[in-house]
Image: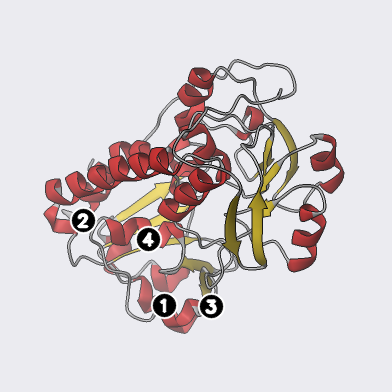
Amino acid sequence: MVLLVAGCSAGDDGGEAEAPSSEATSFPVTIEHTYGSATISEQPERVVTVGLMDQDALLALGIVPVATTEWFSAQPGSIHPWATDELEAAGGELPEVVGDSSAINFEGILEQDPDLILALYSGISEEDYQRLSDIAPTVAQPEGQVDYGIGWEELTRTVGEAVGMPDEADDLIADVEAQFEAARTEYPEFAGATAVMAMPYEGVFVYGPDDPRGRFLTELGFELPAGIADLAGDSFGASLSEEQVDLLDVDVIVWIDSSETDEVGGPLYRSLPVHTEGREVFADSEDPVGVATSFVTVLSLPFLLEELVPVLADRVDGGASD
């Protein structure tokens, strides 16, 4: 499961993005979110993304953000291999990276003079939101969802509304949904099989049904282990205790940010059939497929469906191949 990283052509520090025109939506547009609402008075031209993967939806719509926030697996402009074609097609220079997942760079964002800030895949606080909205209209994470829990469909649709391109966003969503349907048809063995995504963090951290990684599995037809939802509660995931390791006794497990050389899960986990029978997938964060496993977007999903799904099928069908 190795793919060479596509090269990006470095430009200057992100310039002003030319937003495609849209006749479908007139401004102003008001978008509700967890801290109230944001009103965008006219077509945005300078968009900054604070949400850790919001840039993909913009690029899919042909819009290059002037600045992004880096999450992990640093790439120029925080633009990953599956999005470089869209960057080139949009004719935009690489965005400037202002800040990372550890802190919001308010000063750096202010210097970009944005007319829209997107913080959809985020967990920003109300205080952070107020500071950002003093700079420009800011769309925060959705109300009623866990932080870092927005699904790729809602993220794409919301970005489409914010930039006046709702029909184009719907078309993008429909295309990826059709690819999921094709995968479910090609691999009927996924239906009803159990699967989980986990990370060797503070023991074992598992991703629940309100996390994009968990939903990627269920969209393929898998079922999450019983008890994961209760364990995650109102968060996107939770750490397992030694007594809860049986929750990992599934048909297939995806280990995020791990390689086959890592001794993941602890001794009790390594006695489970999922390990002894080789029904594990290791998604190394140094590999684009491993990064995409966490970066669940309208652009990364076709890449994941092509690269990761056949590996999942191999593991479900009997463990790792020689």
Alpha-carbon span between mark 2 and mark 1: 22 Å
In primary-sequence order, the first of circles 3 and 1 is 1
User: CB of mark 4 within 8 Å of CB of mark 2?
Assistant: no
Residue neighbourhood size for the residue with mark 3, other residues' Cα within 10 Å, grouped as few (<14), some (14–19), many (≥20):
some
Alpha-carbon span between mark 4 and mark 2: 18 Å
Left of 51 or right of it: where is 84?
A: left
In primary-sequence order, the first of circles 4 and 2 is 4
In the rendered structure, find residue 316 and report the number of the disc placed on it.
2
- Between disc 2 and disc 1, the foreground one is 1
Image x and y of residue 163, in percent: 56, 40
Q: Amino acid at mark 3?
A: Asp
Q: Classify mark 2: helix, strand or loop.
A: helix
Left of 315 or right of it: where is 308?
A: right
Residue neighbourhood size for the residue with mark 1, other residues' Cα within 10 Å, grouped as few (<14), some (14–19), many (≥20):
some
Q: Classify mark 3: helix, strand or loop.
A: loop
Q: Amino acid at mark 1?
A: Ala
Left of 239 or right of it: where is 272?
A: left
User: Quadrant location of residue 311?
Assistant: top left
Position of 144 relative to 90 (above/below): below
Alpha-carbon span between mark 3 and mark 2: 30 Å
Q: Which residue is under mark 1?
A: 229
